[in-house]
Amino acid sequence: MATVNHLSSHTYDLVKATQAPPRFHSPTESRSQSVADAEEVREAFSSFIGEAFYGQMMKSMRSTLNKPAYFHGGRAEEMFQSQLDQQLAQEWAADSGDRFAEPMFEQQFPHHAKILREAKQAEAGEPLDDLAYLRRR
């Protein structure tokens, strides 16, 4: 099975995520469980995409710099530099990774995106389109 755990501290089975969630007997239990599952998939996906994007960006930026003539720490500096880059990528992914991961999530996992949209609409109440019946006579 394909498990995502390369750059992210989150682990989630993406093969399981692409399949439709199983149907439960209780409608309230199935709805809350499917929303929780969809939210878990979205968080793992956003974290993975953000960390991969920012990690590659930092790696590319570091490759453009030459080593300084003096005060270069050698292999130890390179190792700790990569750890710093990984930490920065995680922070940046948490702050702004959703901006470009959300459209990709909706395309990759349409079923889960639909569940999250419906849950968000249910929390917000009735949409304005349903207010047409309030016209005065």
Image (tube, rainbow, N blue to C red):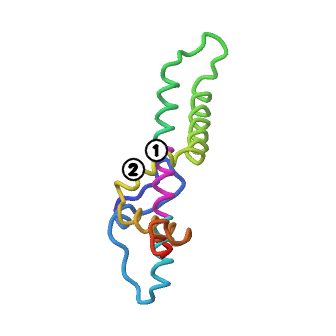
Seen at 49% across and 84% down, the residue is: 28
Distance Cα–Cα, label 2 vs label 1: 7 Å
Task: Classify 21 as above or below 6.
Answer: below
- Looking at the rendering, which quadrant does residue 107 occupy? bottom left
- Marks 1 and 2: in contact by CB < 8 Å? yes
The location of residue 25, given as percent across then percent down, is 41, 89
Q: In terms of secondary structure, what is the magenta stretch mainly?
A: helix
Task: Classify 98 as above or below 127.
Answer: above
The location of residue 48, given as percent across then percent down, is 47, 50
Q: Which mark is residue 100?
A: 1
Label 1 is placed on what type of residue?
A: Phe
From the image, tell me which residue sits under label 2: 104
Label 2 is placed on what type of residue?
A: Met
The location of residue 89, given as percent across then percent down, is 56, 40
Task: Classify 57 as above or below 134.
Answer: above
Magenta stretch in the rendered image: 40-52
Residue 44 on the magenta segment: yes
Q: Is mark 1 on a helix, strand or loop?
A: helix
State the residue lying farthest toward the top: 69
The location of residue 37, given as percent across then percent down, is 47, 70
Residue 45 on the magenta segment: yes
Q: Is 3 positioned to the left or the right of 47 in the image?
A: left
| Front residue (pair 75, 63) | 63
| Front residue (pair 17, 111) | 111
| Front residue (pair 107, 50) | 107
Number of disc labels: 2
Seen at 46% across and 42% down, the residue is: 52
Q: What element carries label 2?
A: helix
